[in-house]
Image: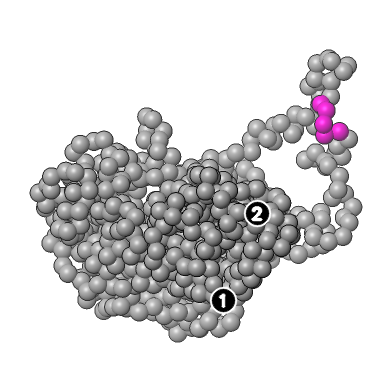
């Protein structure tokens, strides 16, 4: 980066990231100026005629400031409006030179800069972080050959098979047209009216009703490219590929009651978690796994690999791990980067190609189009966050907010200006340019013009059943209970029976549990467009079977009050930090907690503002004196009670037992006296506790 604060070069092979230099006094940078560079003498008072007279129209400082403020907002994304992002890199750990010619996949050890944005889908930009929803997982790779955007989700399938249904899906799930609620969530009439009429959405609904849709952290969820893509090698040969991101910290979700309570405790739970982890140097990390296959394999599966409502089970086609994604720097400015970043599935590099997946094909149009209206100009690719870090040279010109100054006379091609010494500009590159995949002759890539889908797309239930069968009992209970929760919020009488009629095709037991939970009669099974087939369960689909028993990257709350044991507190904090977890001390008063040795410390959070749902496990480190005080504090009782019903480990001192009793805590393996074994206990969630604390469907 240039040290010159006035260097405005960016993009197009130049500097793409304009930041204020970190060190040293820089002439001019400490002076407030207008946008025209005029120094401002007074930023407190507008210009007026006399001390009590009218404000003058000629006050260009005031007018410019208010004018700019008036236009600070831009339209938010129609979906995925609420997002959080970070910079980092992708490092290749295994060369793929035999499979794709994409430059970023050639040299083991090479790092490619990335910008990654996570998001919820349905809520607006200011909505909460923990509704039941799909999470976006969009990665922009700034490769040497141009930008490649892998715009994925944390769920490997989608609600619909054809892009033409997307506006219907989004209208149905977002706040209802007349009443403008709910803000962020699918538990309402229009969503379930639509979904129950769309059997192809059933597989995705199973995922959306599972704990996948209530992740603990962006850092603890998987990402998926969803569609089948292609890799193209140097000879033009194509290999199908599905992309998977696997979190280093393992998969972890919340329980539904916890997710609900998090909405009140911390609207920004995921955003804060990502930001704080990166600031603390605990860089979030994922492995890139690939499922690679050919036409022959694709033809033998009982589903169509071009259908985005289907997965390829990892047990059938294991992942090949080829790299790692590390996020190591928070954005400098939320608006300039996280808000203005524009991902587009059509941004691919030589060596990567599309397939005919009809959902993907529609996406190829949508993103560029929506970004023009969101960012206001066809030149949004010039914004620092969107600009490739390789040269951009073409004859596209002008438009609103043109930020480059293309010199010279040539703005068309072909031209002969070069031969006359006037600079001819760039030329096309038949050899190194982007070639599209050529289908082998004989493959059915074309045919009559029809509004129709391939035959196997009609199987809407086999994989929904596969998902159900692959879950633990506890996860199945969560899925059934989520259907009950969501459908219980639906006022349209015809909808719940219709949905349960679809679920009968997935699994009769599931349908029965949902009907019972709703208190409705079991309806007739709805006819299936194609009879489902049984597939072997896939343990990879379960979160609980893939959780890492670790406290790494987790946050442990320690409740103290006057009289808490100073030595025990220090050694607990040390052991938590040694395990790469975060210790967070909570007290009834945030300042001046007097410990057993007479020392006075400041807590990290006050009790009422730091409820236990923001922690992964808790320690109740109270003396008899502190317990006496907190027995009369509802927030303390709830602190303990919620940790228990959210299936978390609770470490306690003997003196704190009266508080545990008052909170209804019953002894089990996760309720443990505070000693050396506490951290091992804290690494787990106690699923078997759940039937004792919650009525599940
Ligand atoms: Fe998107 N999607 N989408 N989507 N999508 C957008 O683009 C769209 C789909 C995804 O952090 C929009 O710039 C259509 C699947 C993510 O900025 C829009 C269809 C998957 C993000 C759009 C789909 C996604 C978006 C809204 C059906 C997972 C946020 C704002 C054919 C593979 C990216 C924008 C970010 C954003 C259209 C379906 C992921 C309207 C038409 C499937 C992660 O263009």
- Residue 388 image point, x, y percent: 61, 62
Q: Label 2: how many residues lie within 10 Å, few (<14), some (14-19) or many (20+)?
A: many
- Residue 180 image point, x, y percent: 41, 33
Quick check: 580 above or below 652? below
* Quadrant of the drawing holding the N terminus: bottom right
Q: In the figure, is residue 170 to the left or right of 657?
A: left
Residue that sits furthest to the top in the current view: 53
Q: Quadrant of residue 470?
A: bottom left
Res. 455 visible in picture: no
Judging depth in this view, the residue of 285 and 324 nearest the camera is 285
- Residue 13 image point, x, y percent: 67, 64
Give the residues in magenta.
42-46
Give me the C-alpha separation between circle 1 and circle 2: 49 Å
Judging depth in this view, the residue of 240 and 638 nearest the camera is 638
Q: In the figure, is residue 525 to the left or right of 173?
A: left
In the image, what residue occupies the spot 82% across and 34% down? 43
Q: Secondary structure at mark 2?
A: loop
Q: Quadrant of residue 98?
A: bottom left
Q: Is residue 486 magenta?
A: no
In the image, what residue occupies the spot 70% across and 55% down? 594
Judging depth in this view, the residue of 482 and 186 nearest the camera is 482
Q: Secondary structure at mark 1?
A: strand
Give the number of the disc on residue 91. Answer: 1
Q: Nearer the viewer, mark 1 or mark 2?
A: 2
Judging depth in this view, the residue of 629 and 286 nearest the camera is 629
Q: In the figure, is residue 65 to the left or right of 313?
A: right
Give the number of the disc on residue 562. Answer: 2
Give the number of the disc on residue 600. Answer: none
In the image, what residue occupies the spot 15% across and 50% down? 501
Q: Label 1: how many residues lie within 10 Å, few (<14), some (14-19) or many (20+)?
A: many
Dominant SS in magenta: loop
């Amino acid at each position: 980066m240039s040290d010159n604060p006035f260097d405005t070069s960016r993009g197009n092979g130049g500097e793409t990231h304009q930041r204020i230099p970190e060190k040293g006094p820089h002439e001019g940078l400490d002076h407030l100026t207008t946008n025209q560079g005029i120094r401002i003498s007074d930023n407190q008072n507008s210009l007026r005629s006399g001390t009590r007279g009218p404000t003058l129209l000629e006050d260009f400082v005031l007018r410019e400031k208010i004018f700019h403020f008036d236009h600070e907002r831009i339209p938010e994304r129609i979906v995925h409006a609420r997002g959080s992002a970070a910079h980092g890199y992708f490092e290749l750990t295994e060369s793929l030179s035999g499979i794709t010619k994409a430059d970023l996949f050639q040299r083991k050890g090479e790092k490619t800069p990335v910008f990654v944005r996570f998001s919820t889908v349905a809520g607006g930009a200011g909505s909460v972080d923990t509704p039941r929803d799909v999470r976006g997982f969009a990665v922009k790779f700034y490769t040497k050959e141009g930008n490649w955007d892998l715009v994925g989700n944390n769920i490997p399938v989608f609600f619909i098979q054809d892009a033409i249904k997307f506006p219907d899906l989004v209208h149905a799930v977002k706040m209802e047209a007349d009443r403008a609620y709910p803000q962020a969530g699918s538990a309402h009439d229009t969503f379930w009216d639509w979904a129950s009429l769309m059997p192809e959405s059933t597989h995705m609904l199973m995922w959306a009703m599972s704990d996948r849709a209530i992740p603990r952290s962006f850092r603890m969820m998987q990402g998926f490219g969803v569609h089948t893509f292609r890799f193209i090698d140097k000879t033009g040969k194509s290999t199908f590929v599905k992309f998977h991101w696997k979190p280093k910290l393992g998969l972890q979700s919340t329980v539904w009651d916890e997710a609900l309570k998090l909405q009140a405790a911390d609207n920004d739970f995921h955003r804060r978690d990502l930001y704080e982890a990166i600031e603390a140097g605990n860089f979030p990390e994922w492995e890139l796994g690939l499922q690679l296959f050919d036409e022959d394999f694709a033809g033998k599966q009982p589903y169509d690999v071009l259908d985005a409502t289907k997965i390829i089970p990892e047990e059938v086609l294991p992942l090949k791990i080829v790299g790692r994604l590390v996020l190591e720097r928070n954005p400098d400015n939320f608006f300039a980067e996280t808000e203005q970043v524009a991902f587009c599935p059509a941004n691919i590099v030589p060596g990567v190609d599309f397939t005919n997946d009809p959902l993907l094909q529609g996406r190829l149009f949508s993103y560029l189009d929506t970004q023009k209206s969101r960012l206001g100009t066809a030149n949004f690719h010039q914004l620092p966050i969107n600009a490739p870090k390789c040269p951009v040279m073409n004859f596209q010109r002008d438009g609103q907010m043109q930020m480059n100054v293309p010199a010279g006379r040539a703005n068309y091609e072909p031209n002969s200006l070069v031969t006359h010494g006037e600079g001819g500009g760039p030329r096309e590159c038949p050899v190194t340019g982007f070639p599209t995949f050529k289908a082998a002759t004989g493959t059915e890539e074309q045919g009559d013009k029809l509004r129709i889908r391939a035959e196997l797309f009609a199987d809407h239930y086999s994989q929904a059943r596969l998902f159900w069968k692959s879950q633990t009992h506890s996860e199945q209970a969560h899925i059934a209970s989520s259907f009950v929760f969501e459908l219980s919020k639906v006022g349209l009488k015809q909808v719940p029976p219709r949905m349960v009629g679809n679920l009968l095709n997935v699994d009769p037991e599931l349908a029965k549990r949902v009907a019972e939970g709703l208190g409705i009669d079991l309806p007739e099974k709805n006819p299936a467009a194609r009879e489902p087939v049984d597939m072997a369960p896939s343990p990879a689909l379960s979160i609980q079977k893939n959780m890492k028993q670790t406290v790494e990257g987790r946050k442990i709350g320690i409740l103290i009050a006057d009289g808490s044991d100073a030595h025990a507190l220090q050694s607990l904090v040390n052991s938590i930090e040694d395990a790469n977890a975060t210790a967070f001390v909570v007290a009834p008063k945030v300042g001046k907690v007097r410990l057993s040795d007479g020392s006075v410390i400041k807590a990290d959070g006050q009790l009422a503002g730091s409820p236990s749902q923001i922690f992964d496990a808790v320690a109740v480190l109270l003396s008899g004196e502190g317990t006496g005080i907190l027995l009369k504090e509802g927030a303390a009782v709830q602190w303990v009670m919620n940790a228990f019903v959210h299936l978390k480990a609770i470490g306690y001192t003997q003196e704190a037992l009266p508080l545990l009793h008052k909170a209804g805590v019953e002894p089990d393996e996760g309720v443990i006296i505070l000693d050396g074994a506490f951290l091992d206990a804290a690494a787990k969630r106690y699923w078997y506790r759940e039937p004792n604390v919650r009525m599940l469907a």
